[in-house]
Image (spheres, rainbow, N blue to C red):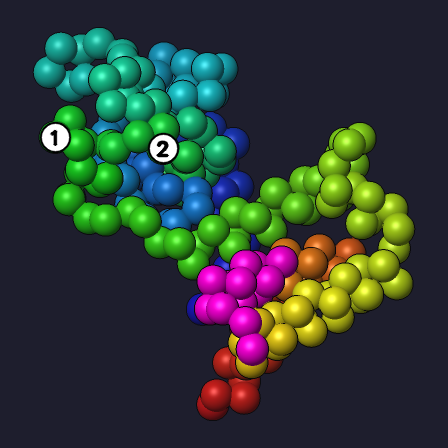
Amino acid sequence: MKNTGAFNKVEKPDFKKNEIIPVIVQDSTTDKVLVFGYMNNEAYEKSKSSGKVCFYDTNTKEVYVKGENTGYLHVVKMLNDALGSTLLVKANPGGPTADNGADTWWGEDNTADIMFFKYLQDFLEERRKTMPSGSYTTKLFKRGINKMTQKVGEEAVEMIIDALNGSDKNMIYEGADLMYHMMVMLIYKGYRLEDLARELKKRHK
């Protein structure tokens, strides 16, 4: 289903209509739902200014920073629904979310390694915007497509050699190099791994 554009139009929850609103916190990398809580206006503003998820305790009537004992939830994005009545917070957890040490409130494992590609792509896109000095990625972007394609070819050959005659450990190492350089090349051309996934999805059908 396509996004109709009806969501995330509300800049801020409507705390005049609802003094407290339900909040869902989702891992920004794995998309796993981490915890559920509530915010009032104070908790919302404190979350924005501090960069750490703050909740409103409906029992004590106090605002607190979530994760002081387990690991803070570092805010990446705060999304309001179309009515401003529910908040979705995408965050990076600094540790387990539950007080008993579990990754989520529901005891689910939150180690989806495949989702690191999503994080890495976002990181590389930010590198292209900021182009920090001393960064190898910055050097690749500055050298252009010829250098990028050369590195992709070199890493592919090295992976093939290790797959045929080397160790599996080296094959994985060179494969990681290949993925990194391919992602840099795709971003330089304005694409992401999701574009490759869509092409493979069409073929799978």
Give 43 or 83, whichever is nearer the viewer: 43
Disc 2 target residue: 93
Disc 1 target residue: 100
Lateral position of residue 123 relative to residue 18, left or right: right
Q: In this rendering, is residue 98 above or below 173?
A: above
Would you say residue 120 is visible in this rendering?
Answer: yes
Measured Cα–Cα span from mark 2 to mark 1: 15 Å
Q: Position of residue 48 (x, y in %)?
A: 47, 20
Q: Which picture quadrant has residue 191? A: bottom right
Lateral position of residue 105 relative to residue 43, left or right: left
| Residue drawn at the location 85% of the way across and 59% of the way down | 147
Residue at disc 1, secondary structure: loop
Q: Amino acid at mark 2?
A: Pro
Lateral position of residue 93 relative to residue 179, left or right: left
Q: In this rendering, is residue 205 above or below 62?
A: below
Residue 39 belongs to the span the image colors magenta:
no
| Residue drawn at the location 41% of the way across and 35% of the way down | 91
Q: What range of the chain is rendered magenta?
A: 165-177
Q: Which picture quadrant has residue 132? A: top right
Q: In this rendering, is residue 131 above or below 67?
A: below
Magenta stretch: dominant secondary structure: helix
